[in-house]
Image (cartoon, rainbow, N blue to C red):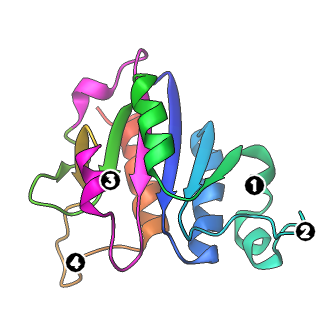
Amino acid sequence: MKDLVVILHNVRSIYNVGSIFRTADAAGVSKIYLAGITPAPIDRFGKTKPRFAKVSLGAEKSVPWEKFASAAKPLHRLKKENYKIFAVEQSKKSVPYYKTPEFHTAASSLCLVLGNEVSGLPPAVLRLADKILEIPMRGKKESLNVGVAFGIVVFGLLYGD
């Protein structure tokens, strides 16, 4: 994979975002775009938020990030730059995350988009995705924590067959 970026759209929990930053650092993500209500690592005075740092363990300093009012602007920019857009969401059009062999090439640039813990990603964001990925569920619960889901999908894409 040539480049890997992440868009977090309306992820509300500062702990989930901090966890995703830490996992993104481990996975070699080059940038995280924070969209909508997704909390940034720093406050309005430019100081690191203590609750964020508790979980991220400083990853906000090693993974570049940028804040946007919505996911539309970075999504459109990345599409123009020929990134493959993978939304992580349960949908009628989703496929298991591990069934993406066509994108395991050094020439591909990839953007993973994850959404709100309760409502997920809106249809407008899903329409911009090249593929919608899901993690098959075997138990009674229908979903995983967004940070856990990110970890499974990102490392599955990096090291899957």
Q: Which residue is mark 3?
A: 125
Query: Which region is colored magenta?
Result: 100-128
Q: Earlier in the sequence, mark 1 or mark 4?
A: 1
Q: Secondary structure at mark 3?
A: helix
Query: Image height check: is 99 above or below 116?
Result: above
Left or right: 22 as drawn, with respect to 84: right
Point out which mark residue 21 bears: none
Q: Earlier in the sequence, mark 3 or mark 2?
A: 2
Q: Which residue is mark 4?
A: 142
Measuring from the top left, give residue 70's x and y in whole percent. Answer: 49, 57
Mark 2 belongs to which amino acid? Phe
Which residue sits furthest top?
Answer: 107
Q: Is residue 114 magenta?
A: yes
Q: Secondary structure at mark 2?
A: loop
Mark 3 belongs to which amino acid? Val
Q: Which residue is mark 1?
A: 60
Residue at image coords 65%, 47%: 25
User: Nearer the observer, disc 1 or disc 4?
Assistant: 1
Query: Image height check: is 106 above or below 64?
Result: above
Q: Quadrant of residue 160?
A: top left
Q: Earlier in the sequence, mark 2 or mark 1?
A: 2
Q: Which residue is mark 2?
A: 45
User: Nearer the observer, disc 3 or disc 4?
Assistant: 3
Q: Earlier in the sequence, mark 3 or mark 1?
A: 1
